[in-house]
Image (cartoon, rainbow, N blue to C red):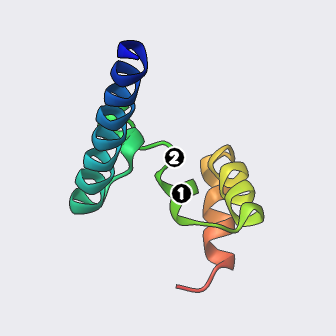
């Protein structure tokens, strides 16, 4: 019975830590990944739900500077 009680305590602590992490991320307007890892690489993917748009953005970032300029001229300001 002690093992079960200890497991339940650990689960509650983990849930509490996850909730605190989420609340901190929301308050700071960052992702939980950023708080844990210090990276922002997934922020755009989290805020943009359109997977096609994300894929197009990723492809554009790989273009040469000249081609990026061409693409930016095609888009409205």
Give the labeled residue for mark 1: 46
Kind of element beneath mark 2? loop
Q: Is residue 39 left or right of residue 28?
A: right
Placement of 17 over or under 67, stated as above or below = above
- Kindly check if marks 1 and 2 are in contact, taking CB atoms under 8 A apart as contact: yes
Q: Is residue 55 left or right of residue 34?
A: right
Q: Can you give x and y, in whole percent of width and height, for residue 30 in the image?
A: 32, 54
Q: Residue at x 58, y 55 (%)?
A: 45
Q: Is residue 61 left or right of residue 9?
A: right
Placement of 44 over or under 20, stated as above or below = below
**Quadrant location of the N terminus in the rendered image:** top left
Q: Residue at x 51, y 64 (%)?
A: 47
- Crowding at dot 1, Cα within 10 Å, few <14 / some 14-19 / many 20+, comes out as few
Distance of label 1 from label 2 (alpha carbons): 6 Å
Residue 38 visible to an observer of this rendering: no
- Crowding at dot 2, Cα within 10 Å, few <14 / some 14-19 / many 20+, comes out as few
Q: Residue furthest bottom?
A: 76
Q: Is residue 70 left or right of residue 24?
A: right
Q: Residue at x 38, y 50 (%)?
A: 31
Placement of 3 over or under 34, stated as above or below = above
Q: Can you give x and y, in whole percent of width and height, for residue 49 in the image?
A: 64, 67
Tell which of 22 and 66 is nearer to you.
22
Give the labeled residue for mark 2: 42
Q: Residue furthest right?
A: 52
Q: Residue at x 61, y 63 (%)?
A: 69
Q: Can you give x and y, in whole percent of width and height, for residue 35 in the image?
A: 30, 39
Tell which of 56 and 10 is nearer to you.
10
């Amino acid at each position: 019975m002690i093992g079960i009680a200890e497991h339940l305590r650990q689960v509650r602590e983990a849930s509490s830590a996850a909730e605190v992490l989420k609340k901190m991320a929301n308050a700071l307007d960052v992702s939980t990944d950023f708080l844990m890892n210090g990276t922002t690489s997934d922020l755009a993917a989290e805020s943009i739900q359109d997977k096609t748009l994300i894929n197009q953005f990723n492809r554009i970032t790989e273009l040469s500077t000249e081609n990026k300029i061409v693409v930016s001229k095609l888009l409205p300001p």
